[in-house]
Amino acid sequence: MVRSLRPSLAPLPDVWVFDLDNTLYPASCSLFPQIDRRMRQFIAEALHLPPDEAFRLQKQYYHQYGTTLRGLMLGHGIEPDAFLAYVHDIDCGVLEPAPALDAALAALPGRRLIYTNGSERHAVNVLERLGIARYFDGIFDIRAAGYIPKPDAESYRRMMERHHVAPARAAMFEDIARNLLPAAQAGMTTVLVRGDAGGWQPPEGEGPLDHVHHVTDDLAGWLAAVVKSGA
């Protein structure tokens, strides 16, 4: 069960760890589907597969390894930088500046980090388009993780070690519930960011959600309320 659906953190975290895609911007803006299509195209071209077989392999590797890239590296020796450059060659113009999130991030005490299974370049492009890049003290991307993706616990250990994150004084925000499990096990407060404007429902196929401490469909509003309640 989700233990709390209301913004309440006391004391406020020292470190705020944010996933990037579909967390800092709504999935409805359709940025990530561009990445999804380019993954399929890359696999089809690199492995000489028809589109439907490339799609099947893409999703198989995602579910099996946490990222499609990890499966391609282990199963086919794909060079990761070529893959990342190709799939992140997208149009970020579909994103609009986020003034409410800008104000909410500005009010947060402590450090703010990005933790993504994507590349640093992609993260910078997204943050700049949203107009919030200046708030982040670091980006921990898939390269920094040694290409070990979330939700592998080793990736979280490396992130916390590199950025000196004390988990008991940190909060992590994600749109994928299973990616919050290692964070909760390490001692972080976890927040599931859902885009369901009509009300939250447990995500299908995610399994038990005891590790999710808070749920919101309005990240900026939730952060503002948390800071206000902790002031």
Image (cartoon, rainbow, N blue to C red):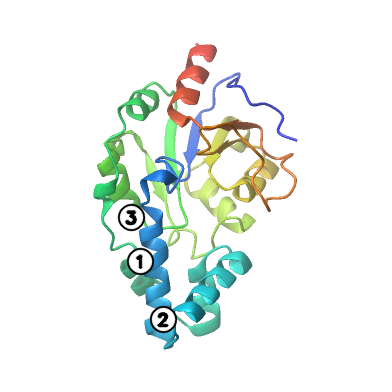
The amino acid type found where label 1 is placed reads: Val
Residue positioned 48% across, 83% down in the render: 77
* Residue ID for mark 2: 44
Q: Amino acid at mark 2?
A: Ala
User: Which mark is in front, 2 or 3?
Assistant: 2
Picture coordinates of residue 119, whole percent (x, y): 38, 58
Could you say which quadrant of the image residue 79 lies in? bottom left
Residue at the limit of the structure toward the front, as seen here: 198
Helix, strand or loop at disc 2? Answer: helix
* Residue 215 percent location from the top left of the image: 60, 32
Task: Give residue 212's quadrant in the image.
Answer: top right
Sequence-first disc among 3 and 1: 1
Q: Residue at x 34, y 74 (%)?
A: 82
| Helix, strand or loop status at disc 3 | helix
Which label sits in the foreground, 1 or 2? Answer: 2
Q: What label does residue 69 carry, if any?
A: none
Instruction: Of the two numbered discs 1 and 2 on the same chain, state the one appearing first in sequence.
Output: 2
Label 1, on which residue?
A: 87
Q: Is residue 141 above or below residue 114?
A: below
Q: Is residue 24 left or right of residue 167?
A: left
Residue linked to disc 3: 122
- Which of pointers 3 and 1 indicates the residue nearer the eye? 1
**Label 3 packing within 10 angstroms: few (<14), some (14-19), many (20+):** many
* Viewer-side residue, 197 vs 159: 197
Relative depth, front residue between 2 and 74 = 2
